[in-house]
Amino acid sequence: MKFCSQCGSSAIVWQVPDGDNRPRHVCSQCNEIYYQNPKLVVGSIPEWEDRILLCRRAIAPRHGYWTLPAGFMENGETTPEAAERETLEEANARVEILHLYTVLNIPHTNQVYMMFRSRLLDLDFSPGSESLEVELFREEDIPWGELAFPTIEQTLRLFFDDRRRAEFGVHLGDISANWHDKRFVKRRPRE
Amino acid sequence: MKFCSQCGSSAIVWQVPDGDNRPRHVCSQCNEIYYQNPKLVVGSIPEWEDRILLCRRAIAPRHGYWTLPAGFMENGETTPEAAERETLEEANARVEILHLYTVLNIPHTNQVYMMFRSRLLDLDFSPGSESLEVELFREEDIPWGELAFPTIEQTLRLFFDDRRRAEFGVHLGDISANWHDKRFVKRRPRE
């Protein structure tokens, strides 16, 4: 942030505003405060019988790696609408959103992932502009070594575990910066 | 948005960038694109035996109305950490976060609420700088007509219903612009 988007001044400082407890970008000319907050990444796990739809990414980051359809939530929509839209945009696939499945915090990238289970309505899918390929995978064929993000791997691992036990919950957890070295901490409801 | 925060130009236009499908603020001088995304509001339902902690707001909007402790999630934290921090800031109350309880979409204000059940660790609470009063309420004493936001009312109604049935799930739903005229649509997992 180099200029104030309200008054155009370049007098932007990084300081704790009055009554606040953490530093923000503040315009010392007009006193405008700029807050930055985590973004929601929303997507779906499209199911067709025993197979799951994955997309191979045509864009950075992780070009060429496989992912579940997901992306930044937009203003004016709900989380299930965002999941449905991302699935349509990335895979030209129509789904019925079933229910919330994983909520994954990624504090080091300022993101929260929300992934929904969904049911593919037909097999008329194809790569959207952000995908190279779109394909259905059985569990044994999932390209575990070529998944784009830890959130996607974690969501798929939980999904296949739960499917084996025929019991799907809502999973909340964190993805740490050194995720590949650590076990994912699965938080279960405690009563 | 009147000036580009990257180059300082006032040539900000509202248009659909190449490869995108919705209008954004774009700087026609340096081509920087400004995305706006929904914000997460995270909070907790602090329980002490059969009572719930509420805060009376000392700030706009809804000054003087009662709320559960909640606020905008900050960068660098997880959702349970945000719930714990907001409860500490608004009520000087220490809680153990139990589990995710409501996820409420508010598309007309570009917000998603996430409320967690929590357990008060002691009774040593007091109003934080954003609260006028902090008090424990039994169900029959909840000031239903003086609650600050539909999300808070909805979370409390679901909570007391679930408590009566001794069965707490995760609830996903939407709050519409004309919420006070409509029934909240409770979405349950469908298998």
Image (cartoon, coloured by chain):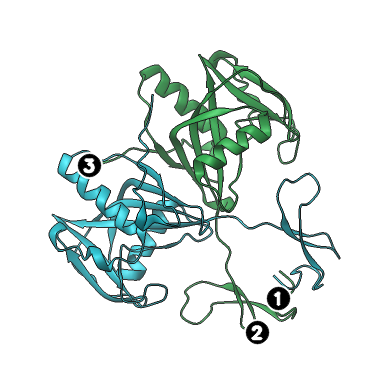
Chain colours: A green, B cyan
Residue A96 visible in image: yes
For the residues marked 3 and 1, what is the alpha-carbon distance in whole angstroms? Answer: 48 Å
Residue A26, given in percent of the width and then of the height, sits at 62, 77
For the residues marked 2 and 3, what is the alpha-carbon distance in whole angstroms? Answer: 50 Å
Name the residue located 17 percent from the left edge and 39 percent from the top edge: B165
Mark 3 or mark 1: which is in front? 1
B165 lies above or below A135: below
The number of discs equals: 3
Mark 1 Cα within 10 Å, few/some/many (few <14, many 20+)? many
B30 lies above or below A60: below
Name the residue located 49 percent from the left edge and 26 percent from the top edge: A157
- The amino acid on which the numbered mark 2 sits, given as a three-letter code, is Cys
Mark 3 Cα within 10 Å, few/some/many (few <14, many 20+)? few
Residue with the most extreme right position: B29
Mark 2 Cα within 10 Å, few/some/many (few <14, many 20+)? some
Which numbered circle lies on residue A4? 1
Which numbered circle lies on residue A30? 2
At mark 1, the secondary structure is loop
